[in-house]
Image: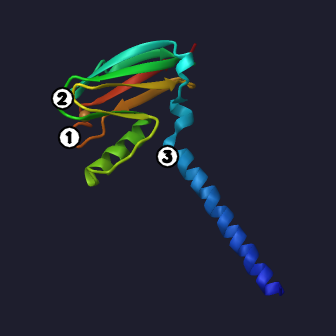
């Protein structure tokens, strides 16, 4: 293999590694999961919080918990439309809502979201690792503005 080939291979590696690093950086920045917490272990649930969905609101829409808690959100859709409960940063929720407006039929299934049909109830178990405000919302077109809520995570 000539020196030229070696050099191009090195460049190829360099490009591949840069792409890989970028991808990691992107997912990290996008999900922000370290800030908002992470999926919780069902065996470590400290309490259950019930949230009702109606058109177009969450009840309650403000929740206070303590850092380190693992919460079982029992989400009941008492409305007549399909709704979604997604926990994320407000920035990501806004992006998500924008994407839903552009592609209303977009399918996505992440551990931080629940799709709940009318009359249905589902649960999401979430471990809150950091203090601060974690947001939740229904990103569906026409719902997002009213269906937002905040989880205040206080120091333990
Ligand atoms: Cu909704």
Residue named by callout 2: 55
Query: Along the line of sight, which residue is nearer the eye, 1 or 137?
Result: 1
Q: Which residue is at a point 35% across and 42% down the rendered structure image? A: 94
Q: Is residue 24 left or right of residue 104?
A: right
Q: Quadrant of the C terminus?
A: top right
Pointer 2 local density, CA inside 10 Å: few below 14, some 14–19, many at least 20:
some
Q: Is residue 56 left or right of residue 36?
A: left
Task: Give whichever of discs 1 and 2 has the lower sequence position.
Answer: 2
For ligand 1, give the image quadrant: top left
Mark drawn on residue 142: 1
Look at the numbered disc 3 and give the secondary structure of its residue. helix
Q: Mark 3 Cα within 10 Å, few/some/many (few <14, many 20+)?
A: some
Give the Cα separation between the discs numbered 3 and 2.
28 Å
Dots 3, 2 in contact, CB < 8 A: no
Q: Calculate the distance from the C-alpha at mark 1 to the C-alpha at mark 2.
A: 10 Å
Quadrant of image for the N terminus: bottom right
Q: Are marks 3 and 1 in contact (CB under 8 Å)?
A: no
């Amino acid at each position: 293999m000539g020196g030229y080939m070696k050099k191009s291979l090195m460049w190829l590696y360099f490009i591949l590694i840069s792409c890989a690093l970028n991808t990691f950086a992107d997912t990290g920045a996008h999900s922000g999961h370290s800030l908002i917490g992470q999926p919780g272990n069902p065996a470590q649930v400290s309490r259950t919080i019930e949230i009702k969905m109606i058109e177009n609101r969450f009840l309650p829409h403000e929740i206070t918990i303590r850092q380190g808690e693992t919460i079982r959100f029992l989400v009941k859709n008492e409305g007549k439309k399909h709704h979604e409960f997604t926990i994320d940063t407000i920035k990501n929720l806004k992006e998500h809502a924008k994407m839903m407006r552009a592609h209303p039929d977009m399918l996505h299934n992440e551990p931080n979201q629940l799709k709940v049909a009318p009359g249905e109830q589902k649960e999401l178990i979430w471990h809150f690792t950091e203090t601060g405000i974690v947001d939740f919302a229904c990103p569906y077109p026409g719902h997002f503005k009213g269906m937002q809520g905040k989880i205040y995570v206080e120091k333990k």
